[in-house]
Every structure is written in structure tokens, then in C-alpha cells.
Amino acid sequence: MKVVNVHEAKTKLSALLAEVEKKGERISICRNGKPVADLVPHRRPDRLTPHPIMGAIKIKYDPTEPLKDDEWPETD
């Protein structure tokens, strides 16, 4: 991972972005030697992988089954 200071990141932002885009590497931006931010390549989420929490939900009835007459809400 490449490390640059804030001043270098400001002056060479376009070149750094091109490097991230081309090589797919992360670039860490530091202030006074301490990491502040990371430039990382954008990745589209994988839409075929189920969400870990949503994938754990189990429906114990048929949601397409029509309601019976006594299950409809009462109207006045």
C-alpha cells in the first residue's frame, strides 16, 4: 500500500486517482505520519450474494395465500 501525506495528495490527486483506477491499489493519506483516509478502488456490490441478516429470515407461512374473511380488518 502506498502512503502519501496530505500535501502530496492535494497536489497529485488526479494522478493518485488514476493509479488507484489502473492498478487497483489502496493509497493511504497521512497527516503528521498518522493515517487519515484511504483511497480505494470503487467496487460494485455483488447483488447475487444474500445479505447475512436478511438471508437468515425464515417465513413460516405462504405470503401469497389469500386472507380468509375473518382475517380482514374490520371497517366501520
Image: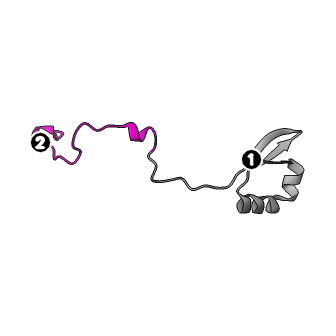
Which residue is depicted at the point 57% across and 56% down?
A: 44
Reply yes or no: does residue 54 show up in magenta: yes
Q: Quadrant of the C terminus?
A: top left
Camera-side residue: 2 or 13? 2
Which residue is depicted at the point 64% across and 55% down?
A: 42
Which residue is depicted at the point 71% across and 61% down?
A: 21
Residue of label 1: 38
Residue of label 2: 68
x and y percent of residue 72 in the render? 16, 41
Part of the protein shown in magenta: 51-76
From the viewer's perspective, is 69 left or right of 20?
left
Q: Is residue 27 above or below residue 18?
A: above
Q: Nearer the viewer, mark 2 or mark 1?
A: 1
Nearer the N terminus, badge 2 or badge 1?
A: 1
Q: Amino acid at mark 1?
A: Asp
Q: Amino acid at mark 2?
A: Lys
Rounded to the nearest whole Å, what is the CA distance between mark 2 and mark 1? 56 Å
From the viewer's perspective, is 11 left or right of 36?
right
Prevailing secondary structure class for the magenta stretch in the rendered image: loop
Camera-side residue: 30 or 25? 25
Q: Secondary structure at mark 2?
A: loop
Which residue is depicted at the point 21% across and 43% down?
A: 62
Camera-side residue: 33 or 23? 23
x and y percent of residue 9 in the render? 84, 53
x and y percent of residue 6 in the render? 86, 48
